[in-house]
Image: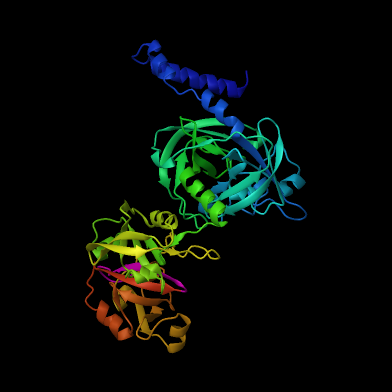
Amino acid sequence: MNRFTLRTLSCGVLISLALAGGVQAQSAAPALSSLPDFTGIVQKNAPAVVHVEAKYNGKKTAKGRAGQRGGMPGGMPDTPDDDDPQMEMFRRFFGMPMMPSPEDQQHTSLGSGFILSNDGYILTNTHVVDGADTVTVRLQDRRTLTAKVVGSDPQYDIALLKVDAKGNLPAVTVGDSRSLKPGQWVLAIGSPFGFDYTVTQGIVSAVGRNLGSQDQPYTSFIQTDVPINPGNSGGPLFDLQGRVVGVNSQIYSNTGGYQGVAFSIPIDVAMNVVKQIKEKGYVSRGQLGVMVQPVSDDMVKALKLDNASGAAVTQVTPGSAAEKAGLHPGDVITAYNGQSINSSVDLPPLVGQTPPGSKSTLTILRDGKKQDVSVTVGEMPRDKNAVLASGDTEKPAARSGATALGLSVQDLDSETRQQMSLKQGEGVVIRNITGSVAARAGLQPGDVILMVNQKKVGSAAAFREATKDAKPGDTVLLLVRHGDQSGFIGLTVPGGKDE
């Protein structure tokens, strides 16, 4: 008997003992009989799931949107990247034929997909087919069909394929991902490691999960514990009614394989992408024209907020929807169309899915007072990345007045003002870092301070006036421009000598 069998049996013994502790053994039977039977879902839907193969001719290589530096097919690194552990743990996982040759690894990627309609439209992930010269799909009846990439959107990681086939094709039933709740059973069908039509099950762990990813900030994922591995990308996630509720897309792993945390794109998001690709040939996204950051504990203290919920506005783009609506740096957005914003990463998906030109309502806190602001949502340029930033742009702790804050400032010269597109009387430049308070905050000579406690400062004298009354323990909130990025930094006046 091998070690694996022994381990399995040991687990079985432990379960039996646990059931026997103070309870009759037969009491376990009702619990087991209540587990769902997935056979009907599989029999009905497996024919509509396809195996996707993308090939790259010449010197091109298979592409993966999260990790281009590794040796595994599909661009997924075979070892963790110590230089960027957080982002590299979010790995796409499409392309793993069984024991591929090195040349095959360079030129082929594998994934999954599912048929949306009888006329041959198929949905998969962008990263499965991105840049491919040819794409083929294999059906359960072993037919292999050439697929055309009708369109794709890297930001949502959704691609729409089309095949021509005689006779009607089997198709899935599209469900409603908005009705999902943590604890519900879900089922995945796909081709992990090249094993076609592998079925795995689990439960919904969380909904509305934003990963804070720079390349995918507009998706709030479905998190599950469904075992998903390389080759499952683009495959369907089903509910107990046999309806597709998600598109399997990512795993959280430091090994490249399943570790109990998987993410799927909500089918409502995916179908909106499909609709726009069919109607317009591209996907448009709403845009406010603001930079936002999380609300820090220092900001809670300085702005006298109840808690750290919301997205703090650090920069408003001139001429944007946000500027026209009257938003200012220092405003804290707490709700969007009535939906609460708990963190800055919650805002981009809601704005991005809003049709450009439509009116939305922002609930904000300004000067400690709550108010609603109506905004006509703009359209994000298709040739640029998000202007609405969701990343953490704040620096480590720091807040307070000139000398006590550990910095000295001077007026901006006209050349620097022109380079930074600042108006006359707008901002002062940090000349020296003189103490640990400013140093710990990450401030540097050359950074420009635009506001002190939400009041604009345009000269060194104005800065000194704004900070002169800061007492030990007070927190002074600065709006700082570093390069082309702006963010709030709080500096707390030390209680004694600045060490």
Where are the magenta residues, as a range? 483-499
Q: In which quarter of the image is the N terminus?
A: top right
Q: Nearer the viewer, residue 424 or 141?
A: 141
Q: Is residue 467 magenta?
A: no
Q: Position of residue 140 (x, y in %)?
A: 65, 31
Q: Residue furthest bottom?
A: 414
For the point 59% across and 44% down, the residue is 124
Residue 169 drawn above or below residue 15 = below
Q: Where is residue 338 in the image (x, y as percent from the top left)?
A: 30, 53
Q: Is residue 484 magenta?
A: yes
Q: Which residue lies furthest to the front in this view?
A: 167
Please indicate, yes or no, whether residue 79 appears anywhere in the rendered image. Answer: no
For the point 53% across and 55% down, the residue is 155
Q: Where is residue 352 in the image (x, y as percent from the top left)?
A: 44, 57
Please indicate, yes or no, whether residue 491 appears anywhere in the rendered image. Answer: yes
For the point 50% across and 43% down, the residue is 264
133 sits left or right of 175 in the view: right
Q: Position of residue 274 (x, y in %)?
A: 54, 49
Q: So how many labels did they put on this image?
A: 0
Q: In which quarter of the image is the C terminus?
A: bottom left
Quadrant in which residue 403 is drawn: bottom left
Q: Which of 256 and 231 is in front in this view?
A: 231
Q: Which of 297 and 440 is in front in this view?
A: 297
Residue 433 drawn above or below residue 346 = below
187 sits left or right of 408 in the view: right
Q: How does the figure colour the protein chain or chains?
A: rainbow
